[in-house]
Amino acid sequence: MFELEIINADIVTSTQSYRGCVSIQGGKIAAISETPLRQAKQTIDAAGLTLVPGMIDQHVHFMDPANTEREDFIHGSSGAAVAGVTTVIEHTHSQPVQSVGGFDERIRYLSNRSLTDFGLAAHVFPGDIGKLKPLWERGAILFKMFTCTTHGVPALNNDQLFRAFAEIASFGGCCMLHCEDDSITAGNEERLKAAERCDHGVIPEWRSATAEEVAVNNVAFMARLTGVTATIAHVSHPLIVELIMRERAQGAKLFGEFCPQYLFLNEDIVREKGPFAKFTPPARSTDLAQGLLGLVNNGSIQLLASDHAPSTAEQKRTGTIWECHFGLPGVDTTFPMMLNLVSQGLISLQRVVQMYSETPAKVLGLYPRKGCIAVGADADLVLVDRNKKWTVNNEQILSKAGWTPFHGTDVVGKAQMTLVRGRLVAENGKIVAQPGIGQSVSRV
């Protein structure tokens, strides 16, 4: 006797679409059948709905425990679960994980605070190089590094990056890079402030496309030379993808991460909305944004994530454009915005599942426990109404931010039920479970 059976579902994976039933026992997928087995204590009739594996958002900043006035794990993971995300990877900057002791302390602290499963990224500061293997062995999911000083995290210069890459490659680890050249962004800032610029247009001029391109060029080349597995975070325009693909063609274990804000926002919106469109690297031109979608569809960009980095509206209004926080809320809206593209025929649902579930699981070492619908996998599952018409609005955002840059957007497609290891955590836009259901994840 199974605990739960989901019957009459249209099942979509990265490679297949078929009608079937999924039986769940002990938090795992125990059977997949064409017709109901009728051997479960509880049944969900999914007629008219699509069943997909839970999304894995590899790039969120839930701020907990240091900056909980901006976000915390309860609110952030609630927004994730309602949107169809079942696993998140946390990158808190304000109190980063840099030691085994810090890692253990954070896992203990979060043990009763998450609605989704979660992993922790460890940050690499210059003084951490040479001490990374114990953190990897303890369970850090990836190492996060910056090429420019941002969010209080110090930049690593090329020598430091190369040594960190070689060290991480030596024990088979993986890393993620925020790529903007420190000297170029610093020079831009100095010149703009000397000109007494405080208009919203300083954002794309300060965090320029050139700064991103130079940093990615260096990082991608060094990744190939050292053999490290690395992801370029939040790719903002097509030339970055070209640089990644150049090194991949030479054997680099390199991946590109795409975020919806680079498709749906642009420089004009940045200049109009200022603090509420301040994130970095910033949105580029509309033409460059449109070019990204083709690269997403042809496989040149491998990963999808939110880079959820929220601030409340009041915090966004505090100080000048130089002083207000970087970052946007996004975990509540990433999957819905992509589902809307699916409804418009601009991307396939299989491709979204591949980018936002399967490939993150593979790159992070969580596959096949996560990121797939297969016997033996965790029963992280989402039932989607692909025909649901609704409007994104600020009142629906469960993140502490309480707002979204996509407020007022009409979309088609919505997660209706989210299960984490077979347990229903969200239904019809509401949380129906208690924090603590989410557990820390480890590599397979």
Image (cartoon, grey):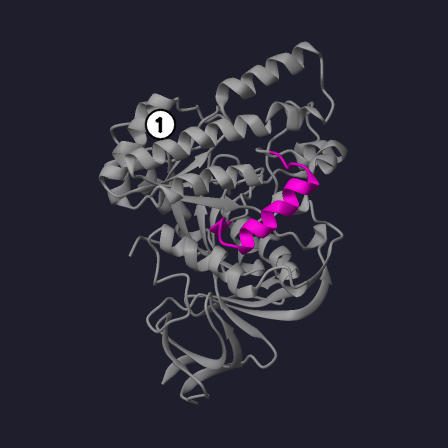
Q: State the image coordinates of residue 369 (x, y, percent, origin top left).
A: 34, 63
Viewer-closest of 35 and 345: 345
Q: State the image coordinates of residue 390 (x, y, percent, origin top left).
A: 72, 63
Q: Quadrant of the N terminus?
A: bottom left
- Tell me if residue 208 can be seen: yes
Whether 72 is among the magenta residues is: no
Whether 301 is among the magenta residues is: yes
Q: Which residue is drawn at 54% across and 52% down?
A: 296
Q: State the image coordinates of residue 75 (x, y, percent, origin top left).
A: 56, 50
Q: State the image coordinates of residue 269 (x, y, percent, origin top left).
A: 73, 38
Residue ranking furthest to the top: 194
Going by the image, does 338 lie left or right of 243? right
Residue 379 occupies which quadrant of the picture?
A: bottom left
Q: Residue at x 64, y 22 (%)?
A: 322
* Residue type highlighted by circle 1: Leu
Above or below residue 33? Residue 219 is: above
Q: Mark 1 points at which residue?
A: 161
